[in-house]
Amino acid sequence: MVLKMTEEWDKVFPKSEKVNHRKVSFKNHFGIELAADLYEPKGAVGRLPAIAVAGPYGAVKEQSSGLYAQEMAERGFVTLAFDPSYTGESGGEPRYVTSWDLNVEDFQAAVDYLCSLENVDAEKISIIGVCGWGGVALQTACLDTRIKATVCATMYDMPRVARNGYFDEADSVEARLQAKEAANRQRIEDYRNGKMKLAGGVVDPLPEDAPQFVKDYHAYYKTPRGYHARSLNSNDGWAMTGNISLMNTTAFTNVNEISGAVLIIHGEKAHSRYMGEDAFAQMTGFKYETDNAPAPYTGNAALGVTKVGNKELLIVEGATHCDLYDNFEKIPFDAIEEFVRNNIGE
């Protein structure tokens, strides 16, 4: 398919006068062409360190990933915020299907593209993943040795949620069987109808008894703060059958063997915090002093930074999951920049 990319500024955040911005595209190894925004610091000379950015899961580059990319470009990096395969302005048919294997390839293809640029130092490549793409970023770091630093912001372990439900509340053989049966019935309906039924994005209108994290999602995706017409989360959501692929995915393969640096960031009050803390423990073997089971979850890690070698977990005091989408008072950009620069040899 021929990509149709909007040239005017249609982001949910204001355009910076400190960086140059242009639309670009590149293909992954499956032949899918990905649409992206390239941000370059104005007046910079020589080869610069570079960062590929994606997320949240079901969002588009005009939302949080673009905000992160533009901010890091202001700080002296060449940055690339891209739409994953089958979403946003990127290619791929049918639309709104998901696969972690393919998403990892998307991230690697973004690294390929950055390494090809004349103004990029290919030995100083990093990636940032937000929300579900924080998990994809960690999965990518498990196998791509070109990545010197990986930042996982307010990360989700999407296969875990698909298998076990939120807070592992559906972690049973019976619950998984029911979910698989429902997904496979839907496959039959989709085939008969000639199109995939979408699961719906963030619920709207918001029920009065909605959990706080759903209210937080609504406050971002369903208001001018973060709404975007191409965002799955803002609108009709993923294909209903998508979770069956995620349920069959093993996340963070050989995560304890990652040689590059990894920073996992979560808010103190983030509902997703348990996923990041567990991933950090899986990666490093770190043993927490407490064993706080999810739902309700108040966290095992101490506030601030926990370090194990070149792996770090940063818990931001008072922050919720969605605060790390766009709240400059909560997103620790100084810490992110310092972490990346320290681990790419600057």
Image: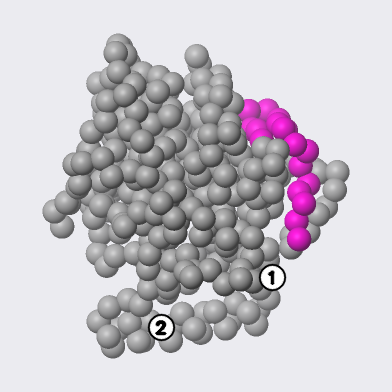
| Of residues 271 and 288, the one drawn nearer to the viewer in this rendering | 271
Indicate the position of residue 141 as horizontal and vertical percent values. Answer: 50, 40
Indicate the position of residue 346 as horizontal and vertical percent values. Answer: 50, 14
> Residue at the spot x=57%, y=60% of the render?
215
Label 2 Cα crowd, 10 Å radius (few <14 / some 14-19 / many 20+)? some
Residue farthest left in this picture: 2
| 301 in the magenta segment | yes
> Residue at the spot x=41%, y=37% of the render?
67
| Of residues 104 and 225, the one drawn nearer to the viewer in this rendering | 225
Indicate the position of residue 193 as horizontal and vertical percent values. Answer: 27, 85
The residue under label 1 is which amino acid type?
Glu
Give the Cα distance between marks 1 and 2.
23 Å
On screen, residue 203 versus residue 63, left or right, reads right
| 311 in the magenta segment | yes
Quadrant of res 214 = bottom right
Q: Name the residue under label 1.
A: 169
Q: Name the residue under label 2.
A: 186
Residue 236 appears anywhere in the view: yes
Q: What stretch is highlighted in magenta?
A: 296-314
- Say which label, 1 or 2, has the lower sequence index: 1
> Residue at the spot x=44%, y=48% of the render?
225
Marks 1 and 2 close (CB-CB < 8 Å): no
Residue 269, placed above or below residue 258: below
The residue under label 2 is which amino acid type?
Gln
On screen, residue 90 versus residue 298, left or right, reads left
Marking on residue 66: none
